[in-house]
């Protein structure tokens, strides 16, 4: 596709009207204005029917407008820069646009056009400084005039507010000055009020940018009380704003309509410049690049006898003004390097750069997190890399590349409006050993990623304040998946870009454990289990086993569980125990027909359940217990047990989950209190051996697992059975039982993320020793 071409998506209705040459309203006139602006910039504008997009082929039905004449182009390739002008309601269409936006090399201006009012208000409710600006429902109905602010994001991701106007309940349009005179009549200073509206708008748009970076234009509606208090009523679509401006102010109308075409043209130019830069840097000799600077007297020859292995240093970055992509390193580092770096990498983002070595009198010793080396980096490179400057990093020099890290990601779900600074507080206790590895940790949603620039917008952990803040950074090199409600293509791309370093890549479910029933390493330790597909199979199984347990495939932590047993007291029928609401409800069921009806009413037949043998658990003081074993990776192949606890049920209860009122105890304590006289050493070894066998079995598959909470049942003979394998385990029992072990478990995924990137972890026993340089765990 020609680089001087951009695409615009139309709805099915808009496409039909354009094909039929119906141009009798403002909305149709907009498309002709798009085409006219394209002609002025010597760009071809293609309009695509959004219903006929084939995103995996990157093609669709298109037409163009030349000299006010509509020309059908047929089924053509979608340009690499497209503008989405539509507010979609159908999930299929939203997904098509998101899939296209995540395609490498594609720029979608306005990935979404429908931030729901509820989602926006829910988000603002989590921001203390913005809560005061949310209008109450009763206030929204009595406002005589609504003020409209248009936000449009520029090429540098900065919001501009080109238009502020007002509209009354009869849809009459006013300038800000006119509306001010009607409502306030000089009771409030006009310019101060206008400035405050812009200030509040920028605060709201700044937060939106971190949650919806693909949202490029939006309208904000404000109510302003006669006291001057500003409150947000809702959002507004750009088409509504354009419709307002079309008859009222032609100059402003054209300004808004031309903007996406101008932005697309700017993106097109920058893409071309980027290609030229890559070509230019590939042609420049390494040493010659250093000579681009005046500071040639300080040039240092790189050692021919330098180490061939990776060189690792603790560093802090400082900026200097330079339009080139440049880093300056002290000669105490440069002398050790075999080759001058020609590119710099942070997370998965790599950019070409030139490296200058400057003379530095300070000797290289005692380099540590608390005594980092200063490295200077140009502002242009900082801006391109989205490099946070207030953190201490490690930097590795290898194969003409400078790699900054470690970079760690917490991958959140796609409902990114649910995640905020308060939500992230529960992650803060994972950073007690942060100064043993340093670097950058960002929590982000796939929905808040700029896929073209490989930039994640989210929340970065600040080790000084020990709090999270809104910020942006390149997609990290290692990602710890903390949610399993994401688009599969997003996960696939993140796995590819991190070179497989997205761990806990798959949501291991109860049904997956069922698939392992024939694996020789563990088959004798799996209770007989079946997916519930017919009532006949269930009846046959309960008749054989007398007592069984029913579990939902997709839930954990004791949620949704039922226990079914034959009614031995009456000799007929069944007893169904319902544990869903943190209590046990007993249902007496007379026969098969009533059982089927009950299971259907409870959703068991339709919501994905499995049934398995009920294991008579070993008991202590008439209280059943099972064992939670936390298995974690310490390198890509090595699993260790990080913690083990027993979860003891309430008296006469069958379920042991802490969340259901169970109690945490150590395995040794429980076995001592048990009347079976079992050897703690023998039981412990059998449990660990089984868990190791399971984890190494997981290594043989295609997924990348690094953490499991394995629920082990000990029967009355002390024989271990695997009940569940939780990929997202709770550690509540460890927190109350053994806080030191709890913290060890919390830290380990971060240590693992550092280790698989090839960065160092300082031994915590010597991290504060000024002579500790080089004493690393890994």
Image (cartoon, rainbow, N blue to C red):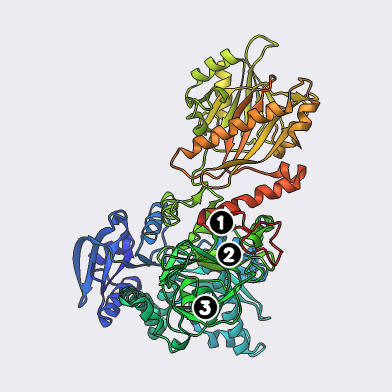
Q: Single out the residue that lies furthest toward the front.
A: 305
Name which of mark 3 and mark 2 comes first in the sequence. Answer: 3
User: Picture coordinates of residue 195 (x, y %)?
Assistant: 59, 85
User: Pointer 3: what residue?
Assistant: 331
User: Pointer 1: what residue?
Assistant: 754
Is 23 in front, or is 459? 459
Left or right of 378? Residue 200 is: right
Q: Mark 3: give few (<14), some (14-19) or many (20+) Cα within 10 Å.
A: many
User: Pointer 2: what residue?
Assistant: 439
Is 190 in front, or is 336? 336
Is residue 455 in sight in this rendering?
yes
User: Picture coordinates of residue 55 (x, y %)?
Assistant: 32, 55
**SS assignment at label 2:** loop
Of the two numbered discs 3 and 2 in the rendering, the one whose residue sits closer to the viewer = 3
Q: Check if mark 2's residue and mark 1's residue have beta carbons within 8 Å.
A: yes
Kindly report the distance in space between the C-alpha atoms of the residues bearing marks 3 and 1: 27 Å
**SS assignment at label 3:** helix
> Can you tell which mark lies on residue 190?
none
Name which of mark 3 and mark 1 comes first in the sequence. Answer: 3
């Amino acid at each position: 596709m020609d680089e001087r071409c951009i695409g615009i998506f139309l709805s099915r209705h808009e496409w039909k009207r354009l094909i039929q040459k119906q141009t009798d309203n403002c909305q149709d006139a907009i498309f002709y204005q798009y085409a006219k602006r394209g002609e002025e910039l010597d760009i071809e504008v293609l309009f695509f029917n959004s219903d006929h997009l084939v995103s995996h082929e990157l093609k669709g039905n298109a037409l163009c407008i030349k000299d006010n004449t509509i020309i059908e182009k047929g089924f053509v390739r979608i340009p690499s820069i497209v503008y989405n002008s539509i507010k979609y309601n159908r999930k299929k269409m939203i997904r098509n646009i998101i899939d296209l936006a995540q395609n490498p090399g594609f720029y979608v201006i306005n990935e979404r056009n429908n931030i729901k009012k509820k989602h926006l208000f829910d988000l603002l409710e989590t921001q203390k400084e913005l809560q005061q600006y949310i209008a109450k429902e009763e206030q929204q109905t009595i406002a005589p005039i609504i003020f409209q602010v248009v936000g449009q994001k520029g090429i540098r991701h900065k919001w501009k507010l080109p238009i502020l106007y007002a509209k009354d309940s009869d849809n009459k349009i006013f300038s800000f000055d006119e509306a001010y005179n009607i409502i306030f009549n000089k009771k409030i200073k006009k310019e101060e009020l206008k400035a405050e509206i812009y200030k509040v708008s920028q605060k709201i748009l700044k937060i939106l940018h971190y949650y919806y970076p693909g949202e490029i234009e939006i309208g904000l509606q404000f109510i302003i009380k006669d006291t001057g208090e500003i409150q947000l009523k809702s959002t507004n679509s750009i088409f509504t704003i354009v419709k307002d401006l079309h008859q009222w102010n032609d100059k402003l109308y054209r300004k808004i309509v031309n903007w996406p075409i101008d932005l697309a043209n700017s993106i097109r130019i920058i893409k071309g410049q980027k290609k030229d830069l890559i070509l230019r840097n590939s042609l420049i000799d390494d040493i010659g690049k250093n000579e681009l600077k005046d500071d040639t007297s300080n040039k240092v020859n790189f050692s021919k006898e330098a180490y061939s292995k990776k060189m690792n240093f603790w560093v802090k970055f400082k900026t200097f003004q330079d339009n080139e992509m440049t880093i300056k390193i002290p000669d105490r580092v440069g002398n050790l390097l075999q080759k001058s770096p020609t590119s710099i990498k942070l997370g998965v983002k790599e950019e070409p750069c030139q490296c200058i070595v400057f003379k530095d009198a300070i000797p290289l010793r005692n380099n540590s997190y608390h005594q980092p080396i200063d490295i200077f980096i140009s502002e242009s490179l900082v801006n391109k890399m989205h490099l946070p400057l207030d953190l201490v990093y490690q930097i590795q020099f290898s194969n003409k590349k400078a790699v900054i890290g470690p970079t760690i990601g917490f991958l959140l779900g796609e409902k990114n409006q649910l995640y905020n600074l308060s939500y992230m507080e529960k992650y803060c206790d994972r950073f007690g050993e942060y100064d043993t590895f340093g670097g950058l940790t960002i929590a982000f949603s796939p929905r808040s990623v700029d896929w073209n620039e490989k930039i994640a917008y989210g929340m970065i952990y600040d080790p000084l304040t020990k709090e999270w803040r809104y910020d942006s950074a390149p997609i990290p090199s290692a990602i710890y998946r903390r949610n399993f409600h994401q688009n599969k293509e997003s996960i696939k791309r993140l796995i590819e870009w991190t070179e497989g370093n997205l761990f806990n890549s798959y949501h291991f479910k109860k049904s997956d454990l069922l698939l392992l029933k024939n694996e020789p390493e563990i088959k004798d330790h799996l209770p007989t289990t079946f997916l519930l597909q017919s009532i006949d199979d269930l009846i046959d199984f309960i008749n054989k086993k007398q007592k069984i347990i029913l579990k939902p495939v997709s839930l954990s932590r004791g949620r949704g569980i039922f226990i079914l047993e034959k009614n031995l007291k009456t000799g007929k029928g069944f007893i169904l125990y319902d544990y869903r609401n943190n209590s046990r409800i007993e249902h007496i069921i007379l026969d098969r027909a009533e059982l089927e009806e009950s299971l259907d009413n409870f959703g068991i037949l339709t919501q994905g359940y499995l049934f398995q043998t009920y294991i008579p658990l070993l008991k202590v003081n008439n209280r059943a217990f099972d064992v939670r074993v936390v298995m974690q990776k310490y390198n890509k192949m090595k699993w260790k047990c990080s913690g083990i606890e027993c979860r003891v049920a309430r008296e006469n209860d069958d379920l042991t989950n802490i969340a259901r009122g169970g109690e945490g105890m150590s395995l040794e304590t429980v076995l001592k209190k048990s009347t079976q006289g079992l050897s703690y050493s023998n039981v412990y070894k059998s449990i660990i051996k089984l868990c190791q066998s399971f984890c190494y079995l997981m290594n043989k598959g295609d997924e990348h697992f690094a953490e499991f909470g394995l629920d082990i049942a000990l029967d009355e003979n002390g024989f271990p059975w695997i009940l569940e394998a939780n990929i997202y385990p709770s550690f509540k029992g460890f927190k109350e039982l053994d806080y030191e072990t709890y913290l060890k478990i919390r830290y380990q995924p971060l240590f693992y993320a550092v280790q698989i990137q090839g960065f160092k972890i300082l031994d915590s026993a010597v991290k504060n020793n000024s002579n500790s340089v080089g004493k690393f765990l890994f």
